[in-house]
Amino acid sequence: MVYEERNLWSSLIVSVIGMTVYVIVVLQQAGGAPLTEVDWVPIMLWTIGGSIVGAIIVSIVWGIVAGMRDPDGVGKSDERDRVISRMGGRVGQAFLVIAGLGVITLCAVEADWFWIANTMYFGFALSAIVGGIASVIAYRRGLV
Amino acid sequence: MVRPPTRVTNSIRTLRESAGLTQAELARRIGVTRQTLIAIEQGRYSPTLELAFQISHVFAVGLDDVFQYPEEA
């Protein structure tokens, strides 16, 4: 597995875990009450911060382990990595557009800030996850 | 039946073995990772024109000797 694919897997795994943890904590805090009453800001900020730090740590640790097995491949990337990265970005971008339209609609109907912020959050999260899955498939099955 | 990802085929493996090069050596000479070279050899990735020329230059042959595309029926 090449350097860029390892980084991709790291951020993909951490994104899925981060999003799952966020949903579980928010639902637990709500405890059956309306979700709009949950103090979501610190939970979201901690989840985003934790996901970024987690992805970096996983990537570094995985890189060290992989580097011991294949010292030549450490930190190397090439044109295939760039092509796959662009393709993954394009696939993920669709979810950002959908989330953006959702946010505009929610603002228009003066929805609670909880729904506006969470629509954008899930747009970012799904964009990263779906784009990451598309890239992983391209690494495994090919991209021509 | 699974449709092949591309109609472009290549003779890189044959040329590489004839030249006595390993995948790692050829990958290093053309500036890509070994995994990318494997993907090209197996037809899972179509290289850019620039990389295709670099490969043909390593073997000192023409582009047509490395990459083939079937004639339209």
Image: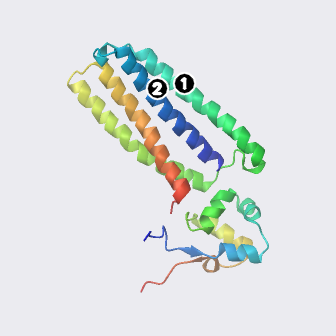
Count neighbours of disc 1 (C-alpha within 10 A) and say few if under 14, some if 14 to 19, many if 20 or more: some
At x 50%, y 81%, the residue is B70
Residue pointed to by mark 2: A21
Please report contact status of discs 2 and 1: CB closer than 8 Å, yes or no: yes
Dot 2: chain letter? A
Q: Amino acid at mark 1?
A: Gly
Residue at mark 1: A50
Q: Is residue A135 above or below residue A49?
A: below
Give the camera-side residue of A33 and A39. A33
Tell me: A31 left or right of B62. Answer: left
Where is residue A134 drawn, in percent x and y?
47, 49
Q: Answer with left or right where residue B55 lies relative to residue A95.
A: right
Residue B41 in which image quadrant: bottom right
Say whether mark 1 and mark 2 are on the same chain: yes
Classify mark 1: helix, strand or loop: helix
Dot 2 surroundings within 10 Å: few (below 14), some, or many (20 or more)?
A: some
Looking at the picture, how far across and down is residue B10, in whole percent? 60, 74
Identify the image quadrant of residue A50. top right
Q: Which residue is farthest bottom? A: B73
The reply to whether residue B32 is in sight is no
Q: CA distance from mark 2 to mark 1?
A: 10 Å
Q: Residue at x 48, y 35 (%)?
A: A16
Circle count: 2
Of residues B67 and B13, the one drawn nearer to the viewer in this rendering: B13
Give residue A92's position: percent from left, percent from top.
Answer: 42, 43
Residue drawn at point x = 55 percent, y = 29 percent: A52
Vertical placement of residue A55 versus A36, above or below: below
| B6 in relation to A10, above or below | below
Q: Amino acid at mark 2?
A: Val
